[in-house]
Amino acid sequence: MTLMAVADLGASSAWTSEAPQERAAEVHDYLESLSVPTGRLSEAQLDELTVRVAARPDLWADLVVDDAEERWWLVLNCSANYEIRVITWERDQSTDWHDHGGSSGAFALVSGVLREGRRDADAVHVEWRRIEPGDHHGFDASFIHDVVHEEGSPAVSIHAYSPPLTVLTYYDSTPFGFVAREILADDCRGDERRARVPQSRG
């Protein structure tokens, strides 16, 4: 099984995927059929992408890994201007407070229940909301949030970012506002995650 599919068709059209090669091609073909713009995608466009991919579990459901120890994700498609990934969530797993390194994004919940905290407009207070299957929303590059698992074994969500994620800044929520704590490269545990991808249908 090939764990990383790569198509080099020139700088503007090259794409990669962490899915098995045949499945990666299926995902890419589907995204191509949506005529995704080549520039930076808006929040609304990213939101629509997550909803469309969430509605096609045949493209990703059998690749999902249920990890009780650490949050797991798989990059389904990454091109020059956006990426799509599937993420699973188990009990007590959360993202911690973070931004997206200058990328805009969106996510759609497929199964389970999550709880999302958002930094308020005053940059101090926090608003929490419950996210249920079918819920989805986009966000801009200034967005800071924390997402926590509540129900489902696992909960599964589809995420999109434009441009693709490179780094994330993590924050402490203090009485004086959100204070940056550290900046981390996005792809931690990459080899470990990819090695656990199930063999997809033949």
Image (spheres, helix red, strand yellow):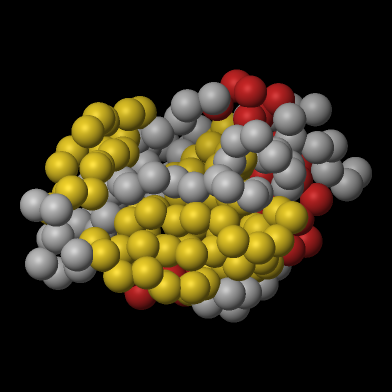
Is residue 191 toward the left or the right of residue 107 in the image?
A: right
Foreground residue among 148 and 191: 148
- Position above or below: 189 against 120: above
Is residue 86 toward the left or the right of residue 3 in the image?
A: left
Q: Residue furthest top?
A: 191
Residue at image coords 57%, 56%: 149
Measured as percent of width and height from the top left, residue 104 is found at: 30, 57
- Position above or below: 99 against 199: below
Is residue 5 toward the left or the right of residue 123 in the image?
A: right
Foreground residue among 112 and 20: 112
Q: Can residue 39 be seen in this view?
A: no
Is residue 7 toward the left or the right of residue 26 in the image?
A: left
Measured as percent of width and height from the top left, residue 135 is found at: 53, 77
Q: Residue furthest bottom?
A: 134
- Position above or below: 76 against 186: below
Residue at image coords 60%, 21%: 191
